[in-house]
Image (tube, rainbow, N blue to C red):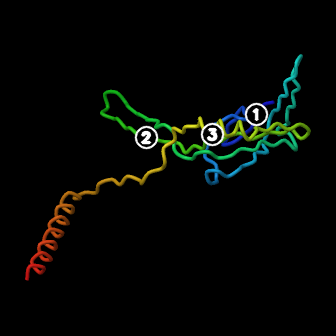
Amino acid sequence: MYAVIETGGKQVRVQAGDIVQIEKLAGEVGSKVTFDKVLFVSTPSETSSEITLGQPYISNAKVEVEILAQGRGDKVTIIKMKRRKQYRRTQGHRQEQTQVLVLGLSDGAKKTEITAADKKVKLAKFFTNLKPKGPASQTKTLGSRKKMTAAKKAASIAAKGTKAKAKK
């Protein structure tokens, strides 16, 4: 049984036991989240599959997930350039992402869940490529080198003053 859910303005195909990377969700690592914006559910059988299509969402359908990791994805570099005009701009961006484990899904009547043993195996194999959010970089201001050298001199003078007092 699989479903298509809507989260972060995107549609994602999920089934029980999948580890999916989606847009950032509010919540801590280890907390459970329920999605009720289910667009499509398919239940396969031996001869054909039973399809439930929402208009736009299926009522009483839910997908339950557990947050495994939160962080920032790969860096995307944006380059703007106009030839022969000496115009070049570069900018980088890293999108906030959440990796989740799909615990179970239901279409209102039928329910599929992952077993505790399968969950343990999935978590043992799980490895995240998301990087934690670091401190923001600060741009250098005009005259910062002069301020830094003045601060170093003041610190060294203060250190010499404490050493001189310690000797007396």
Proximity of marks 2 and 1: CB atoms separated by less than 8 Å = no
Please tell me which residue is depicted at 85% across the width and 36% down the height of the picture. Answer: 55
Front tag of 2 and 3? 3
Residue extending farthest right: 109
From the viewer's perspective, is 17 left or right of 90?
Answer: right
Residue placed under numbered mark 1 in the picture: 4
Q: Residues within 10 Å of mark 3 (few under 14, many from 20)?
A: few
Where disc 1 sits, the SS reads strand
Q: Quadrant of residue 138?
A: bottom left
Q: Which of the 4 image quadrants contains residue 109?
A: top right
Q: Earlier in the sequence, mark 2 or mark 3?
A: 2
Foreground of the two, 70 or 53: 70
Q: Amino acid at mark 3?
A: Leu
Label 1 vs label 3, nearer the camera: 3
Q: Residue at label 2?
A: 92
Give the answer, above or below, for where 131 lies relative to 17: below
For residue 106, side relative to residue 29 (left or right):
right
Q: Secondary structure at mark 3?
A: helix
Residue at point 57%, 43% (across, down):
97
Please identify the residue farthest to the top as the structure is shown. Answer: 47
The quadrant in which residue 121 appears is: top right
Q: Amino acid at mark 2?
A: Gly
Q: N-terminal of the two: label 1 or label 3?
A: 1
What distance separates the C-alpha of mark 2 from that of mark 3?
32 Å
Q: Position of residue 96 (x, y in %)?
A: 55, 45
Residue under label 3, please give it: 123
Q: Quadrant of the N terminus?
A: top right
Tag 1: amino acid: Val
> Percent position (x, y) of residue 22?
63, 40
Q: Nearer the viewer, residue 76 or 166?
A: 166
Lower sequence index among marks 2 and 1? 1
